[in-house]
Amino acid sequence: MPWLALLALLVLSTGCGKGAAEERIAFGENVYVRECARCHGDDGEGYPRVYPALAGDPIVTLDSPEPMIEIVTSGREAMPAFGGQIPIQNVAAVISYVRAAWGNHAGPVTPAQVK
């Protein structure tokens, strides 16, 4: 059955197949807990005047994910750059999760969009 795991990884990383976005979002929650929650909080509320809230953030909820991709990959102010630090599949997953969590209603991101 190792081929099933390989197929699941391929589907998740390419963004193809039914439910790929939901799988990416679920995986993104794990990435968020590991990489982001210590600054932005488990609930995405951040810490006022220190780390911004991601829940309801206008950049997070834009139709275009490009500004958020740029911030996550290149960093901004106190936020470190994650580009080259974590795989693009993880970047796409965590951005997809944040864009869908805590009442945010923005679309998911694919690894191809992260580049």
Image (spheres, rainbow, N blue to C red):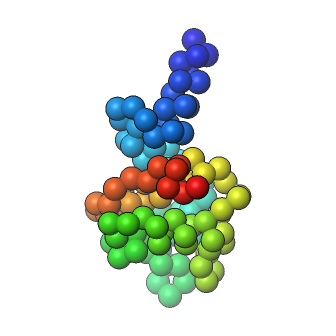
**Which quadrant of the figure has residue 45?**
bottom left
At 35% from the left and 76% from the top, the residue drawn is 58
Residue placed most toward the observer, 35 or 93: 93
Q: Is residue 90 above or below residue 54?
A: above
The residue positioned 63% from the left and 71% from the top of the image is: 74
Image position, residue 78 (x, y; %): 63, 80
Identify the residue shown where x is 28% and y is 60%: 105
Picture quadrant where residue 35 is located? bottom right
Q: Is residue 38 visible?
A: no
Kindly give the residue lying farthest to the right in the view shown.
Answer: 85
- Lateral position of residue 85 relative to residue 103, left or right: right
- Residue 82 shows in the view: yes
Near-viewer residue (74 or 5): 74
Q: Where does the image place residue 62, in percent across and percent down from the top left? A: 34, 70
The location of residue 22, given as percent across then percent down, is 37, 41
Considering depth in this image, is 97 or 107 the residue closer to the camera?
107
- Which residue is at 49% across, 43% downward? 27
- Number of numbered markers: 0
Tell which residue pokes out farthest to the bottom in this image.
49
Q: Is residue 55 left or right of residue 31?
A: left
Give the quarter of the figure containing the C terminus: bottom right
In the image, residue 20 above or below residue 33: above
Give the answer, above or below, for where 70 lies relative to 106: below
Of 113 and 89, nearer the camera is 113
User: In the rendered image of this protein, does residue 88 appear above or below residue 58?
Assistant: above
Q: Is residue 25 left or right of residue 40?
A: left
Q: Quadrant of the N terminus?
A: top right
